[in-house]
Image: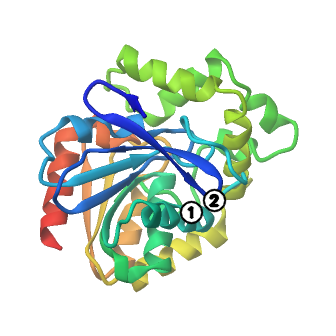
Amino acid sequence: MRRGRDLIDSYISVDGVQVRYRDSGGTGPTVLLLHGIGGSLELWSAQFASDNRAMRLIALDLPGHGLSGFGGQPFAPKTFAAFVWKLADALGLSKVHLAGNSLGGAICLQMQVLQPARVQTVLLAAAANLGRDCPMPFRLMTLPGLGTLMSRAGPMAITQQIQAIFGPSFVVTDELRKTIERNVMRPGAQAAFLATLRRMTDLGGQRASLVGDAHAALASASVPVLLLHGRQDSVIPFAHSEHAHKLAPTSRLQLVDGCGHTPQLEQSAVFNAALRALVVQA
């Protein structure tokens, strides 16, 4: 175990992969928090720091991310989903609420497909796979050679990630910048990032097959779903969530002003209130 400011980060082996996770230790409903591609559990720090004591929050570093092991990269959303369910089993979790940002949202949808009886609600924060649009650099990274060059670890990769996932008005703290720098510069991390990105994306954008999977998952959902999206998101257009809302009979849509691709940090008070309301609804 490794102690942070207020909580203890723990490690558990799942399929031979050492997974780092953070558990708030609450006694209320359990919420699994899943970050986006290239991210880590620190991107949920505002949820652990806020007044969410009525819930048990568990965030993890997905394989190939943060301080978790790499496992059998690349992972697609369905593979990640099966892996996270094995983590839930290892932690003795029966039913859970799911909240995911970007790639994490795509994983949440596939977890709901795999084991619907165990899912109580789903919060999709700027979820991936709801439409094909994505930034041109992501598309170009799918090309041999060029992708390796563009994703190379270094100051440019750190700056590009910060500029992409946060809106222009968000102030990145030194602590958060150091986390992103650690994630990017960790040996092997950028190769894992590129492998997963290529599994998710082609020159046309987010892969059409994955978009189809996500839309089918939404259409079949029987639990409350909240689609929460920043209006200033430069990675995934909020129009994706608007369209997805029409496909999901159990969904609500919440668009957030002054917010880029990471609403749980950029507009944490709005996000936390929405999460609490969703969990209470179940």
Quadrant of the image occupied by residue 32: bottom left
Q: Is residue 157 above or below residue 206?
A: above
Please say if the residues under marks 1 and 2 sit with CB atoms less than 8 Å apart: yes
The quadrant in which the C terminus is found is: bottom left
Residue 123 appears in the picture as rendered? no
Residue that label 2 marks = 15
Q: Of helix, strand and loop, which one carries label 2?
A: loop
**Residue 180 x %, y %:** 50, 26
Secondary structure state at the residue bearing disc 1: helix
Identify residue type, mark 2.
Asp
Up the image or down, 42 lies above or below 157; here it is below
Q: Image quarter for residue 213?
A: bottom right
Mark count: 2
Residue at figure coordinates x 36%, y 77% from the top left: 118
Q: Is residue 213 visible?
A: yes
Left or right of 102, for residue 255: left
The circle on residue 83 is 1
Query: Which badge, 1 or 2, is on the more N-terminal residue?
Result: 2
Measure the alpha-carbon separation of dots 1 and 2: 8 Å
Q: Is residue 21 left or right of residue 77?
A: left
Determine the residue positioned at 74% across, 53% down.
203
Foreground disc of the pair 1, 2: 2
Q: Position of residue 275 (x, y in %)?
A: 21, 56
Residue 124, numbered circle? none
Asked if residue 265 lies left or right of residue 243, the reply is left
